[in-house]
Image: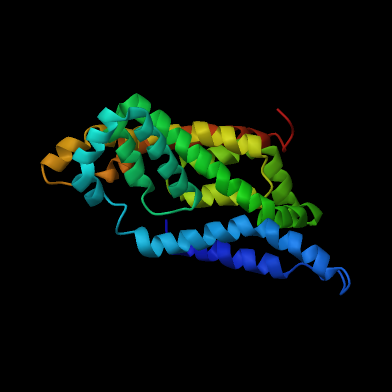
Amino acid sequence: MGVSHRGCAAHLYLMTLHSDPPAGKAEMPETRKPGLARHLPLIVILAVAVLGFLTLRDQLTFDTLRDNREALLALRDSHYLLMVAGFVAVYIAIVAFSLPGAAVASVTGGFLFGLAAGTAFNVLAATVGAAAIFLAARAGLGRALAARMEASEGTVKRLRDGLQENEISVLFILRLVPVVPFFVANLLPALVGVHFRNFLWTTALGIVPGALVFTSIGVGVGEVFDRGEDPDLSLLWEPQVIGPLLGLAALAALPMVIKALRGRKDI
């Protein structure tokens, strides 16, 4: 994911942080500290994300996996549970701090643990990491923006009401459409007041198709390295892969279409 998404999120965050009306000179020392503390998790995530992009983008690569694959396989064979715990922890950190290398981590899951276990570990780690950034964003910036949207009228209110009516469908679409960066799909729902439980289970289910694709690439990555090649991630855009994903996205959007055709009435 690019720096533009992080820069946009940081700019939006700073605007919200400075837009709170002063509560008065006598009360400012008491109210500002809790407010800043609430924003601290998101500030840390954004800072680490930018730092990680600048320092780790050349480290978490397929070349690194190729150079260390024998050591990783030996560690897996001798300390399987330790390897699982370490892999899941690293993957959670990559997602939670939006660090580069998520695709490499997904492929590594398949390379080390096979299709079934690798997919399970990839989905678990990605879901936990997504939940972490969602909660951090909602605690500070998301709470303020959600309150403003709730109090707004006109177009903003209609947008908010429409999101509440179609929350599940929108969340699934964000996960199933490949063009939506994972960072955006984690951050945006927190900023508009999506319910955490809905975010959590739609994330866990919605990322399964993509996780299967990346994990399956990892299962055969050893042979790819032996040929002196890099894994072909363009497989995601092959018709036999992108077609079913878009079909699932269309299925997720179907309830919204039906509601629109029925004048936004309950089904």
Vertical comparison of 238 with 29: above or below: above
Q: Is residue 256 visible?
A: no
In the visual, does 17 lie left or right of 221?
A: right
| Nearer the observer, 83 or 213 | 83
Considering depth in this image, is 214 or 97 the residue closer to the camera? 97
Quarter of the image for the C terminus: give it. Answer: top right
**Whole-percent x and y of residue 139?**
68, 51
Quadrant in which the N terminus is drawn: bottom left
Q: Measuring 36% from the left and 50% from the top, which residue is drawn there?
A: 101
Residue 56 visible in image: yes
Q: Residue at x 87, y 72 (%)?
A: 24
Along the horizontal axis of the image, is 75 left or right of 39?
Answer: left
Where 88 sits versus 9, above or below?
above
- The residue lying toward the viewer, choosing from 11 and 38, is 38
Tell me if residue 225 comes above or below residue 23 in the rendering: above
Quarter of the image for residue 118 reads top left
Q: Is residue 117 left or right of residue 26?
A: left
Residue furthest left in the image: 227
Q: Seen from this angle, which residue lies furthest front?
A: 78
Residue reaching furthest bottom?
Answer: 25
The location of residue 199, given as percent across then percent down, is 60, 38
Q: Residue at x 38, y 47 (%)?
A: 102
x, y percent for residue 249? 49, 36
Q: Is residue 112 left or right of residue 180?
A: left
Display coloring? rainbow
Is 6 rendered above or below residue 186? below
Q: Residue at x 43, y 49 (%)?
A: 94
